[in-house]
Amino acid sequence: MPTRGAHPVIFQYKEYALPKPREYPMGEIQFEEGGRTFTCHVAPCVATPDTSWWWVSVAGDGQRYAAFHANPKESKTAVKKRVVAYYEQVLADRARPPVPRAEFVANRMAATARKNAAAAAKAAVVE
């Protein structure tokens, strides 16, 4: 048994089994909209195993999305509308330019120090 100092280190591994999602009458939905093929199915997420999500895959897009919580009373038409609206928003978000992030103070200080050093070196050469 490995030890750390005088105390033994005990390793414990647990296996987590995801609970089976509630039965949903639709199961899997596949449809075409706007030249894209959407495949949707209900499954839990590892982060929220007690909640079922509509997972969406779009042909030609390598990403799989947990679009929204599944509701067993929701109709197939309502799910299709929500999926298409969700994916349109994903595409709009991708097309938008990235939001500029705040610059860290340390980066600003380093840039100022480099600028001052360059100015000092230039002044030393001129004199």
Image (cartoon, rainbow, N blue to C red):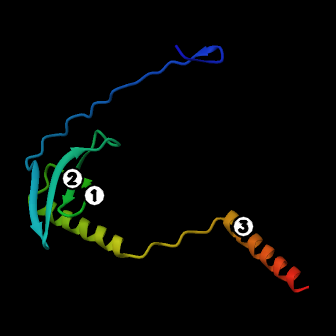
- When asked about the image quadrant of residue 31, the answer is bottom left
As displayed, is residue 98 above or below residue 51? below
Residue type at tag 2: Trp
Q: Which residue occupies 35% across, 43% down?
A: 47
What numbered label is drawn on residue 54?
2
In the image, taking residue 98 as reference, residue 115 lies left or right, namely right
In the image, taking residue 46 as reference, residue 2 lies left or right, namely right
As displayed, is residue 96 above or below residue 47? below
Q: Which residue occupies 24% across, 66% down?
A: 87
* Image location (x, y in percent) of residue 104: 64, 65
As displayed, is residue 66 above or below residue 97? above
Q: Residues within 10 Å of mark 2 (few under 14, many from 20)?
A: many
Label 1: which residue?
63
What numbered label is drawn on residue 5?
none
Q: Are marks 1 and 2 in contact (CB under 8 Å)?
A: no
C-alpha distance separating marks 1 and 2 = 14 Å
* Image location (x, y in percent) of residue 22: 17, 40
C-alpha distance separating marks 2 and 3 = 47 Å
Label 3: which residue?
110
Q: Earlier in the sequence, mark 2 or mark 3?
A: 2
Residue type at tag 1: Gln
Q: Earlier in the sequence, mark 1 or mark 2?
A: 2
Name the residue nearer the viewer: 77 or 98.
98
Quarter of the C terminus within the rendering: bottom right
Q: Which residue occupies 29% across, 44% down?
A: 45
Q: Residue furthest bottom?
A: 126
Q: How many marks?
A: 3
Q: Which residue occupies 69% across, 63% down?
A: 106
Q: Earlier in the sequence, mark 3 or mark 1?
A: 1
- When asked about the image quadrant of residue 7, the answer is top right
Name the residue nearer the viewer: 84 or 37.
37
